[in-house]
Image (cartoon, grey):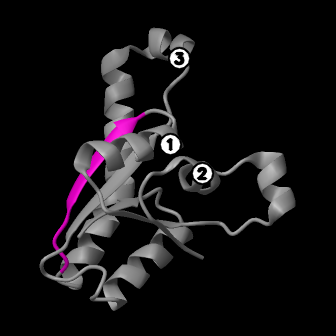
Amino acid sequence: MKILLPADGSEYTKKALGFLATHENFCGPEDQLLVLNVQSPMPPRVRAMVGSSAVQKFHQEEARRVLDPIEKFLKRHALSHTERWVVGVAAQEILKAASKEGAHMIVMGTHGHGLIGRAVMGSVAQRVVTESQIPILLVR
């Protein structure tokens, strides 16, 4: 099975990782895990002020800040993976990566906001669940 794990470095990502590490039927030796970090784009004015290379370096550093601890965790648990980071709108990029990579499932942590919280602030997980063509496992 090919699993996509969106990772933002939050406690919710850690819970999803913990779930995968303790459930070999999801992330066994034959399975493929792709860890995806989505960085929010910089406003055009900021990009113009600091330059494209500075923005690229910033995104790269932020991605490493999220992905490096995940890589260490997965190595400790002998789970192989690939990782990628992109810049864009989180839900859109998650869905795009799932399609492009041929993922069979998306496993993601969620804040677990109730109905009112989702209505007021929106939710990446809610949008992914609503628009995904493949199964989603939300870990809270």
Of label 1 and label 2, which has the lower sequence position? Answer: 1
Query: Which of the image's four quarters has the N terminus?
Result: bottom left
Q: Are marks 1 and 3 in contact (CB under 8 Å)?
A: no
Q: Quadrant of residue 62?
A: top left
Tag on residue 46? 3
Q: Which residues are magenta?
A: 79-87
Return the residue nearer the eye: 108 or 56. Answer: 108
* Residue at the image point whose x is 52% and y is 44% from the top: 91
Q: Are marks 2 and 3 in contact (CB under 8 Å)?
A: no
- Spatial distance from mark 2 to mark 3, Cα to Cα? 32 Å
| Label 1 environment density (alpha carbons within 10 Å; few <14, some 14–19, many ≥20) | many
Q: Position of residue 79 (x, y in %)?
A: 19, 78
Q: Position of residue 4 (x, y in %)?
A: 34, 60
| Kind of residue at disc 1 | Ala
Mark 1 vs mark 2: in front = 2
| Kind of residue at disc 3 | Val
Q: Is residue 87 above or below residue 26?
A: above
Asked whether 83 falls inside the magenta stretch, the response is yes
Q: Quadrant of residue 53?
A: top left
Of label 2 and label 3, which has the lower sequence position? Answer: 3
* Residue at the image point whose x is 77% and y is 47% from the top: 121
Query: Which of the image's four quarters has the C terminus?
Result: bottom right
Tell me: 89 left or right of 104: right
Q: Are marks 1 and 2 in contact (CB under 8 Å)?
A: no
| Kind of residue at disc 2 | Thr
Q: Which residue is mark 1?
A: 90
The kind of secondary structure element at disc 3 is: helix
- Spatial distance from mark 1 to mark 2, Cα to Cα? 14 Å
* Residue at the image point whose x is 32% and y is 68% from the top: 70
- Spatial distance from mark 1 to mark 3, Cα to Cα? 20 Å
